[in-house]
């Protein structure tokens, strides 16, 4: 099993709307996320708008990377990114979807 963490920022004033959108995640999007090999996907919020996301996969890194590349090509992923775009803070507004930073795992305790 592999674990992945990343950070991104949203506009803090939109926290409740952002949360509501995820509470009502489109079923077909959730299905595609699972099909990509993602499980135990969690997003945490900090008051300044910083989000930490965590997910797990049972896939090897090469297969997972390929699956994610395919996922981002899907219409449902593009539509969700466009829908969520208004909440996300980015250094480059031309980027559609999250401008996130992957984190390196340095410790894990089972």
Image: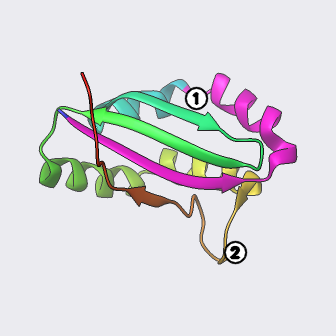
Q: Quadrant of the C terminus?
A: top left
Judging by the rendered image, the residue that carries numbered circle 2 is: 93
Q: Nearer the viewer, residue 3 or 94?
A: 3
Residue ID at (52%, 24%): 27
Lower sequence index among marks 1 and 2: 1
Disc 2 secondary structure class? loop
Q: Quadrant of the N terminus?
A: top left
Relative height, residue 31 to residue 13 (above, below): above
Q: Position of residue 3 (x, y in %)?
A: 28, 39
Q: Position of residue 19 (x, y in %)?
A: 71, 31
Disc 1 secondary structure class? loop
Q: Nearer the viewer, mark 1 or mark 2?
A: 2
Q: Tell me which segment is drawn in magenta.
A: 2-26
Task: Report whether 86 appears left or right of 56.
Answer: right
Residue ID at (40%, 58%): 102
Residue 19 falls inside the magenta stretch: yes
Image-quadrant location for residue 58: top left
Color scheme of the displayed model: rainbow
Q: Position of residue 25 (x, y in %)?
A: 60, 28
Judging by the rendered image, the residue that carries numbered circle 1 is: 26
């Amino acid at each position: 099993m592999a674990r992945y963490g990343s950070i991104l920022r949203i506009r803090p004033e939109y926290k409740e709307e952002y949360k509501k959108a995820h509470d009502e995640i489109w079923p077909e999007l959730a299905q595609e996320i699972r099909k990509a090999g993602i499980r135990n996907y969690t997003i945490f919020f900090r008051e300044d708008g910083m989000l930490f996301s965590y997910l797990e996969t049972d896939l090897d890194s090469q297969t997972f990377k390929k699956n994610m590349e395919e996922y981002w090509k899907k219409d449902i992923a593009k539509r969700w990114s466009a829908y969520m775009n208004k909440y996300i803070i980015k250094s480059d507004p031309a980027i559609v979807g999250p401008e996130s930073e992957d984190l390196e795992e340095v410790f894990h305790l089972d």
